[in-house]
Image (cartoon, helix red, strand yellow):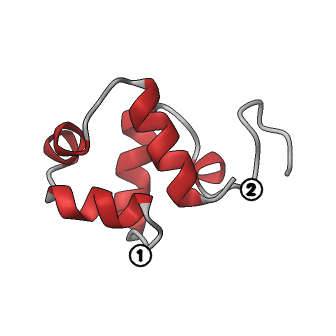
Amino acid sequence: MLFHQRVKELREDKGLMQKELAQQLHVVPSMISDWERGKLRTSFEGLIALAKFFEVSTDYLLGIVDEFGNPM
């Protein structure tokens, strides 16, 4: 699974709208939309903020490991 798919899945699992996630991360809603559509890559800061917010590793967000930490 790719970054944009992981972000969308995690957001939906928390029952958040894109606007709500954007507010939590202090970004504009269009940035969340662009991340989820794969149109925009996040910065390192954004990646860390997403990992902290969703309580997952950056490796998970990047598709390097699965939800159990096993290499993909």
Give yes or no for contact between labels 1 and 2 (Cβ–Cβ under 8 Å): no
Report how many numbered discs are placed on residues in the image: 2
Closer mark to the observer between disc 1 and disc 2: 1
| Residue drawn 35% across the image and 60% down it | 46
Vertical arrangement, residue 51 with respect to residue 47, above or below = above
Residue 64's label in the rendered image is 2
Quarter of the image where one finds residue 8: top left
Q: Say whether residue 44 is left or right of residue 72.
A: left
Quarter of the image where one finds residue 15: top left
Q: Say whether residue 66 is left or right of residue 57.
A: right
x and y, in percent, of residue 60 in the image:
64, 46
**Label 1 packing within 10 angstroms: few (<14), some (14-19), many (20+):** few
x and y, in percent, of residue 26 in the image:
14, 51
Q: Which sits earlier in the primary sequence, circle 1 or circle 2?
A: 1
Cα gap from disc 1 to disc 2, whole angstroms: 20 Å
Vertical arrangement, residue 53 with respect to residue 37, above or below = above
| Residue drawn 39% across the image and 47% down it | 50
| Nearer to us in this view, 30 or 23 | 30
Q: Which residue is mark 1?
A: 39
Quarter of the image where one finds residue 62: bottom right
| Residue drawn 58% across the image and 43% down it | 57
x and y, in percent, of residue 69 in the image:
77, 37
SS of the residue under disc 1:
loop
**Label 2 packing within 10 angstroms: few (<14), some (14-19), many (20+):** some
Q: Which amino acid lies under the numbered mark 1 shown in the image of this protein? A: Lys
Q: Which amino acid lies under the numbered mark 2 shown in the image of this protein? A: Ile
| Residue drawn 85% across the image and 40% down it | 70
SS of the residue under disc 2:
loop
